[in-house]
């Protein structure tokens, strides 16, 4: 069982509000990721991090931003939410290494609805 | 870059029957192929994975096969049970992208009691 936690699990907010989705892992993993997923659809990588002070954009363009000040913490922020941001956001982590097959562990997801 | 295609998008089987989900990948250098199961309202969970130096791997009722020549890999679930109903995702990772996986589009499996 992976020790990666996301809060809030469900959030409904109004357009224009600023929100931060929290993600924490207790496994000491260096690599962390944020994926965006519409219900039952593909997972799209929007941000990733190799370690503290490292953040990179993923394959899918996103208006969100991330930070990595501590190894265990990788929050995602939307400065001004819009209805198009309504989606599920999945945080994940994996060990750092040059070997293949570093397993990626996912959190339970944060369901964001912008009205 | 890597591209992963997954079929079918939906699959309905009778309890006790077998289910097979297939994925193809484009990058011949890809060497790690995990499968994830996602239940409603939850994050994906790794159920089995295979590396490119192995052709088949089994874990109780689930198995994965890999054909490197044809660049495809498959998930096999035998003696399906209603609790197997979920969305299944395949993924692939190439040698030049050790930090991220490329996911297939998912297969919604329904096991009818």
Image (tube, coloured by chain):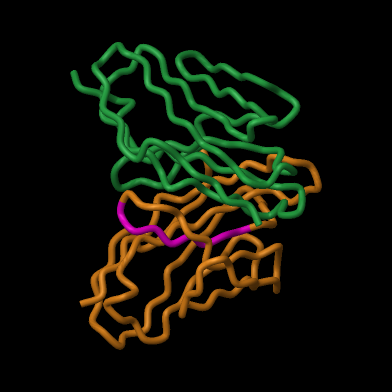
Chain colours: A orange, B green
Q: Is residue A72 above or below residue B14?
A: below
Of B36 and B11, the residue lying toward us: B11
Q: Residue at x 54, y 53 (%)?
A: A92
Residue B74 picture location, percent across and down: 52, 28
Q: Quadrant of residue B31?
A: top right
Q: Quadrant of residue B18?
A: top left
Residue A34 is one of the magenta-drawn residues: yes
Q: Which quadrant of the figure contains the C terminus of chain A?
A: bottom left
Of B63 and B82, the residue lying toward us: B63
Range drawn in magenta: A32-39
Q: Is residue B85 above or below residue A48?
A: above
Residue A93 picture location, percent across and down: 59, 52
Name the side, left or right, on which A32 lies relative to A44. right
Q: Residue at x 55, y 38 (%)?
A: B24
Of A62 and A13, the residue lying toward us: A62
Residue B104 picture location, percent across and down: 48, 46
Q: Residue at x 33, y 26 (%)?
A: B84
Q: Is residue A13 above or below residue B56?
A: below
Residue B34 picture location, percent across and down: 57, 36
Residue B34 is one of the magenta-drawn residues: no
Q: Please, which residue is most extreme toward the right here?
A: A98
Q: Is residue A26 above or below residue B58?
A: below
Name the side, left or right, on which B101 lies relative to B42. right
Instruction: Give the total of numbered labels.
Output: 0
Q: Please, which residue is most extreme toward the front here?
A: B70
Q: Main secondary structure of the magenta part?
A: strand
């Amino acid at each position: 069982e992976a020790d990666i936690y996301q809060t809030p699990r469900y959030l409904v907010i109004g357009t224009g509000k600023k929100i931060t989705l929290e993600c924490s892992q207790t496994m000491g993993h260096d690599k962390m990721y944020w994926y965006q997923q519409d219900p039952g659809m593909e997972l799209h990588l929007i941000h990733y991090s190799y370690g503290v002070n490292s953040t990179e954009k993923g394959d899918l363009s996103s208006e969100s931003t991330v930070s990595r000040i501590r190894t265990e913490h990788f929050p995602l922020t939307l400065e001004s939410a819009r209805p198009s941001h309504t989606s599920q956001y999945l945080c994940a982590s994996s060990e750092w290494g040059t070997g293949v097959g570093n397993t990626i562990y996912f959190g339970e997801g944060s369901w964001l609805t912008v009205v | 870059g890597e591209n992963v295609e997954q079929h079918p998008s939906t699959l309905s089987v009778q309890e006790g029957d077998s289910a097979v989900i297939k994925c193809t990948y484009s990058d011949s250098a890809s060497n790690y192929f995990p499968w994830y199961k996602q239940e409603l309202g939850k994050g994906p969970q790794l159920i089995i994975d295979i590396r490119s130096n192995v052709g088949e791997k089994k874990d109780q009722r689930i198995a994965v096969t890999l054909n490197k020549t044809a660049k495809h890999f498959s998930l096999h679930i035998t003696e399906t049970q209603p609790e197997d109903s979920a969305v299944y995702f395949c993924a692939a990772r190439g040698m030049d992208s050790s930090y991220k996986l490329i996911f297939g589009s998912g297969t919604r499996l329904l096991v009818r009691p």
